[in-house]
Amino acid sequence: MRSIECRTITGTVASLFEKACIYLPADVTSSLRRARKSEESRLGLYALDTILSNIKAAGEDNVPICQDTGTAVVFLELGQDARIVGGSLDECVNEGVRTGYRNGYLRQSIVSQPFSKRKNTCDNTPAVIHLDMVGGDRLKISALAKGGGAENCSRLTVLPPSAGYRGIVDYVVSIISECGANACPPLIIGVGIGGTVEKTMLLAKRSLLRKTGMSNRDPETAGLERKILSEVNKLGIGPMGYGGRVTALAVHVETFPCHIASLPVAVNMQCWCSRHNEATI
Amino acid sequence: MVLLSGKIISARDASLKRVVEGLKRGEELPFRLDGQTLYYMGPTPSRPGRAIGSAGPTTSSRMDGYTETLLEQGLKCTIGKGGRSMRLKEKMQECKSVYFAVVGGTGALVSRCISRAEVVAYPDLGAEAVFELEVHNLPAVVINDIYGNDLYVQGRAAYQIK
């Protein structure tokens, strides 16, 4: 059994969020630069150029890229031969969020009691934590700072199995068409297909941790990703909804086997500002 | 495209709820609404030595209901991101009010355009408090003008491939 200290987890989580909110992953920035080459609209180019200047400004000024530093979503992959010592896993992750958001001057955006008091918890906790047990003795932590505007445009449905490939494409495209400019395009569209309703949204969310535009390993699923991307980019919404060719940077699809009666499909929307970061202890 | 300079106020979901509830009770507000420009925004905390933290726009449509009441009080301009409801667009045109968008997620650049930020109401709401901001050359795009034009509708139509 390998021991992993709680305080190491706390420090790692804190640092992952602090950095994620100021420095965008290189693959996201490269994807935005590539988008510039295919954009034809003047205002679309203005939006992309402003976004790229902003990414630079955030690093220079040590200021968060976006003021919505999000809900702290933490994916944990815990090796079954590792043992957490010095406290509870849940609490040390939340302490990391608390510390990272305070030290990084990140915004506290979480309210308790969602439908009445909505009182700010003032430390951005609790984090949304997903734990998976895996082989080995390491702990992999993926931190995702998930902004509210794009999350609000996420949707889930259960299609009849007869809807098939075309039904999925039409559903995803209809969501993007409906949410238009609100989710801060150019988007990264996370799509989950299969499993049960909670599983399919989790697949969609997890797909957002992928490098931008990296295809699914299954050729048929990769083909579906390309088809959805091409249909979405025909909508004309463009960067920031000002009109243009690039409404989405990438579509990431993840699948899971499902019940004979069901075809669940989830869309987890990600704005261009895809802030995530990971570390293995 | 325009560059905005001068004093504006910022508020969002929780603070606008209070503003509108206060107006309904006939209370005096701690800031002026007549001729005012309202930016839908809740900043990150400012680091020492800076006027404000990251300060980009939030999604405007959540504020459509509140905004209708504020337009009746003389609110002149709103700044945010994303489309407005048909009902609000009609109301904005009737009140000759303009809606601007700032590029979403660009809070670090916007921060450079703000030289002073002061909480003028509801400090207990943290980032959602009402701030008075002094802005210099804040770049914005006109989405809805007073003639009924809508850039989100027109821009999309120009690039849609059927």
Image (cartoon, rainbow, N blue to C red):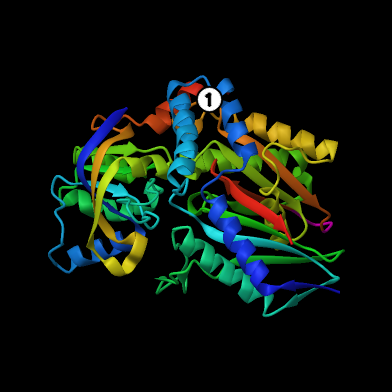
Q: Nearer the viewer, residue A202 or A17?
A: A17
In-image side of A10 versus A106 (left or right): right
Quadrant the N terminus of chain A occupies? bottom right
**Residue A262 in magenta stretch:** yes
Residue A23: quarter of image: top right
In-image side of A200 versus A99 (left or right): right
Q: Nearer the viewer, residue B102 or A166?
A: B102
- The number of discs equals 1
In-image side of B152 versus A153 (left or right): left
Name the residue furthest bottom. A87
Identify the main secondary structure in magenta: loop
Residue at position x 44%, y 48% from top? A63
Give the crowd class for mark 1: few <14, some 14-19, many >=20 residues within 10 Å. Answer: some
Residue at position x 47%, y 28% from top? A49
Residue at which label 1 appears: B160
Give the percent coordinates (x, y) of residue A191: 68, 47
Q: Nearer the viewer, residue A44 or B87?
A: A44
Residue A222: quarter of image: top right
Q: Which residues are magenta?
A: A259-263
Amino acid marked by disc 1: Gln
A30 in relation to B25, above or below? above
Is residue A234 among what the camera can see? no
**Residue B127 in magenta stretch:** no
Give the percent coordinates (x, y) of residue A59: 49, 42
Name the residue furthest front. B49
